[in-house]
Image (cartoon, coloured by chain):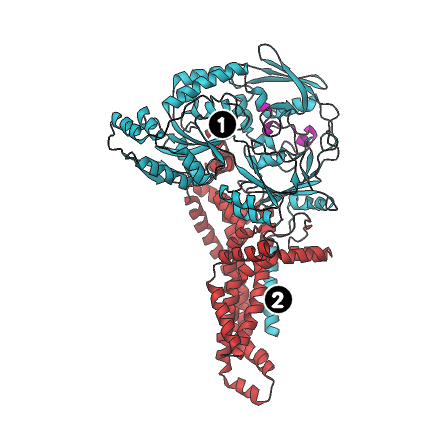
Amino acid sequence: MLSYTLRRIGQLIPVLFGMSIVVFAIIHAIPGDPAQVILGEKATSESIHNLRQQLGLDQPLYLQYIHYIGQLFHGDLGTSLVTQRPINQEIVPYLAATAELTLFSMVFAIVIGVNAGILSAWKRNTWFDYAAMIIALVGVSMPIFWLGLLEQWLFSLQLHWLPVLGRTNPRDPVTSITNLYLLDTLLSGNLQQFWSVVRHLILPGVALGTIPMAIIARMTRASMLEVFKHDYIRTARAKGLGEFWVVYKHALKNSFAPVLTVIGLQLGSLLGGAILTETIFGWPGVGRYMFDAIGNRDYPVIQSGILVLATIFIVVNLIVDLLYAYLDPRIQYK
Amino acid sequence: MKKFALTMSATVLSATMILAGCGSSNPSNTASNAGGNSAKSGGKTLIFGRGGDTVTLDPANATDGETFRVTDNIYETLVADKPGTFDVKPGLATDWSASKNGLKWTFHLRKNVKFQDGTPFNADAVVFNFNRWMDPQNPYHKGDFEYFTNMFGGFKGNPKAVIKDVKKLDDYTVEIDLAHPSAPFLADLTMAAFSIASPADVKKYNGDIKDHPIGTGPFKFVSWKPNDSITLEKNPSYWDTGKPKLDKIVFQVIKDNKARLNALQAGQIDIMDGLNPADVPTVKNDSNLQLFTRPSNNVGYLAFNTQKKPFNDPRVRQAINMVVDKKALIDAFYNGMAVPAVSVLPPSMWGNDTSLQDYQVNIQKAKQLLAEAGYPNGFKTDLWAMPVARPYMPQPEKIAAALQADMKKIGIDAKIVTYDWATYLKKTANGEHTMALLGWTGDNGDPDDFLYVLLDQDNANPPAQNIAFYKNPEVHKLLVQAQQETDQNKRADLYKKAEQIILKDAPWVPLVHSTPPMAASKKVTGFVPSPVGSDILTNVDIK
């Protein structure tokens, strides 16, 4: 197990290196000059020229790449062309905002999805099963932006139950410690602010979590039904074990491995969905940070941002694989 | 259940790794956020929703409106604009005078003014700031100081430089010596780029004050979360006693115009810029909201590349001027929040020739002109449309489609072409287009900022700001003469003459001067929209 873990981590290096080349090449193929975008329609050619020189954009691409990789080895993600700030520092609050949102939506997706799947399998062919699977079908086919706008219209603008956008109430700003506001507000013991942060999380969290929730529910149901056919379930029932324990203890353990894979994959794809959600809900997350960087042709931010996201994606997959091995010891690693 | 708990802890673990991987460094601007709490209790906070973030908090090194919108509330200039107009009023200087030849300007400074760091404002501070901007050898001259070179011809040593020297006469009197008379000089000094910063602050940060602004203005800087919000709080020792009325302002970035309006309707923000003209009825129908319009200070236009066939023939350009229905454009795309443009200059600006007669829609006459120019059956061409909405052009591609339909009436088959914004600006500046949509927002209320920049032959060499590449020696002579004339009435006459020639030559179809709409909660009082887009919020209150 240990050697497998180390080998998997070792594999990350060539993957990330190859990706850095591909990303660098693609980004520099996008038309448009960052200097022009930064300076806008009123810029003179002289100032554009000066800015290009200052930013090192006048150097050949391979030199720019070597310089970039050199910085990375020193743990430096570079400097944003637009804000002139180190990306290492700048990206942290954005990542935290996205982490908080994706975790919230993942918890929502897992808690609702897994339980709905279990109950559907357990109560197969009842009204609950039908209703849950219809909801899952609708959920999986509903575009995030549409669901988001619908939620905003209904719960914010019509019913005034929840805030329409943002992470916190700007009239009562959260003091950042970890940049995870749920944690920050708890650490400072401000329960009113904590509740405000939760309220801000609900609409975007549900919008983002609905598709994974639906997929997890369907996967859990299918997997549970498969497991129900096995003899040991019949044995468990024959022993006189309560139905609840049969389902939640015996069946769930053995049906959970494929569900876990789906959860891992969904967690990765959430990063993509986060861009849309963050745009609709004015969420200051890394998706929006990258989206703006692309619009501004802010090369270092795009490059390093993709690298950071890819690393997260790979690490999440690694954790899922390791858990998979733990759950199902029959899987052999060579 | 154990496995379920395992999954949960794995998820939490991966999140922890995400954060651990990024290091625990705390960005400087978040660290200073702790100050935000002090103003929390019982204060009047105004949340201002806007579409983009500030680029820098050093106005001397900025050219964009989102920067000035914030810095204008932190810093002050020697002279300022009266709210909502371009009329010059006292700022940090209480009065001023110019010598007869227009070369020596004397400014008497306001007394008992302090910078937000407690250091005194005086003649030394003014001289320090001018030297920082104008002298490339100055140790604190770090950056482009682009507006300084644009407005004042260049830095010290440049033969075109307008400002020769800035001297302290006594503690509260400063003299500025010019190399040659400059008519827009006083108007230029109202621009946010010439805000006076605390010399102590500039020295402390070695010239780099983009994160550490200290001025004399009504509000002081608290924190900046990039792409999210900038918080300012009341300057308790502001010289104008009893002001400002607000305790705190938060400039909140909400990219999408519609999302911003949602936030306003939900009460999460108090005022917003960048309202879609199409959403004006929504604001009017909401009893909690009020509508504002900015005074028109822009022009949206269709430029012909006058160096390219067939647009090198004025008859072709005039013919197209005769098919464009500006009223219909305004009704369809601006929700009535614009006036048809005849001249380059917005109607409220002095020097505007109100007697100009615009081309009337006349298809027959247009066809006839085209035939005379040798195109009886029209021709094929490209019509370039910009990819981004601007205040003067809310829906550029739809406007292009409307113009395309208008031109079709006289047989001109125009294909709509577009590029990303940076490429578009570069290609039009290089003259690669045939016809292109673009626009301009004024900086200082001076006609020179429109006419000379956009239609003088000096600016018609690639990369050009005169994207019509219009060169008329007569117009050039008038515009240069107007730059050196100090009598405003005489200048206005020169501009009117130039406008008449331009109208006849038709290098553009001037489309509209828009009055960009804004919306606010009914609770907001005392707000006067500024024509340049950076609103000073000293007199704003919230009920």
Residue B241 against residue B96 in the figure, above or below: below
- Residue A155 at x, y = what percent? 58, 57
Is residue A186 positioned above or below B519 on the image? below
Query: Residue A160 falls in which quadrant of the image?
Result: bottom right
* Residue occupying the point 67% across, 50% down: A176
Work out whether B221 lies above or below B81. Answer: below
The chain displayed cyan equals B
Magenta span has B203? yes
- Is A100 magenta? The answer is no
Q: Is residue B100 left or right of residue B330?
A: right
Query: Of residues B244 and B68, which is closer to you in this image?
Result: B244
Query: Does the rendering let one see residue B135?
Result: no
Give the crowd class for mark 2: few <14, some 14-19, many >=20 residues within 10 Å: few
For label 1, the SS is loop
Residue A23 point in image, percent of width and height: 45, 50
Mark 2: amino acid: Ser
**Image quarter (top left, top right, bottom left or bottom right) of the N terminus of chain A:** bottom right
Mark closest to the chain's N terminus, 2 or 1: 2
State the residue in front, B276 or B235.
B276
Tell me which chain appears red: A
Q: CA distance from mark 2 to mark 1?
A: 63 Å
Q: On the picture, is B23 further left or further right than B452?
A: right
In which quarter of the view is residue A180 placed?
Answer: bottom right
Q: In this orientation, which residue lies closer to the viewer: B407 or B438?
A: B407
Q: Which residues are magenta?
A: B188-208
- Circle 1 is placed at which residue position? B346
The residue that label 2 is drawn on is: B9
| Secondary element at tag 2 | helix
Residue B339 image position (x, y, % from top left): 47, 32
